[in-house]
Image (spheres, helix red, strand yellow):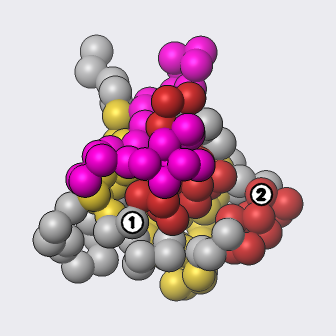
Amino acid sequence: MPYISSVVIHCRDPYVMAPFWSLVTGLPVHEEDAVKLADRTLADRESVLLHDPSGTEPDVWLAPALDLLPVGRIHLDIVADDEERAAIVAAGATLVREQDDLSVFADPEGNEFCLLTERH
């Protein structure tokens, strides 16, 4: 059966977006990429990997792009409790709209994602 191997998020600034999406997804930045982020030594247009060491979650790649589409370049559904939701907002997410069973937020570059209280 097919499964999601990875999600790619095109971005302008992986130095901003990798820590943000690491917090939102709970996936740590891959060790080599964490060093490059800390030292600010990513190569031009180098992607950053968020990776679950257990291999049970899909990888997330933050890939710099020269031209970005308008909002909607990605979409993820994220399950988060109230404390996690507050941390996501503190990290730079903005509320776009509330719906019956989910909240739509935007990341610092305008990509929308949903926060759910439980998996659908």
At numbered mark 1, what does the secondary structure look like: helix, strand or loop? loop
Q: Answer yes or no: do the residues labelled 2 and 1 have beta carbons within 8 Å? A: no
> Which amino acid type is marked by label 2?
Glu
Between the residue at mark 2 and the residue at mark 1, the CA separation in whole angstroms equals 23 Å
Q: Quadrant of the N terminus?
A: top left
Q: Left or right of 1: which side holds 48?
A: right
> Which amino acid type is marked by label 1?
Asp
Q: Residues within 10 Å of mark 1 (few under 14, many from 20)?
A: some
95 relative to 57, above or below: below
Kindly indicate the quadrant of the structure image that contains residue 69: bottom left
Kindly indicate the quadrant of the structure image that contains residue 73: bottom left
Foreground disc of the pair 2, 1: 1
Question: Does residue 42 show up magenta in the picture?
Answer: yes
- The residue nearer to you, when weighing 120 against 52, is 52
**Which numbered disc covers residue 68?**
none
31 relative to 108, above or below: above
Residue 71 visible in the shown view: yes
The prevailing secondary structure element of the residues shown in magenta is: loop
- The residue nearer to you, when weighing 104 against 68, is 68
Reading the image, the residue beneath label 1 is 13
Residue 89, how many percent across, how many down? 69, 73
Residue 88, how many percent across, how many down? 68, 65
**Which numbered disc covers residue 84?**
2
Q: Which residues are magenta?
A: 34-59
Residue at 49% in and 30% down: 32
Q: Left or right of 70: which side holds 80?
A: right
- The residue nearer to you, when weighing 1 against 33, is 33
115 relative to 69, above or below: above
Question: Does residue 47 show up magenta in the picture?
Answer: yes
Residue 100 visible in the shown view: no
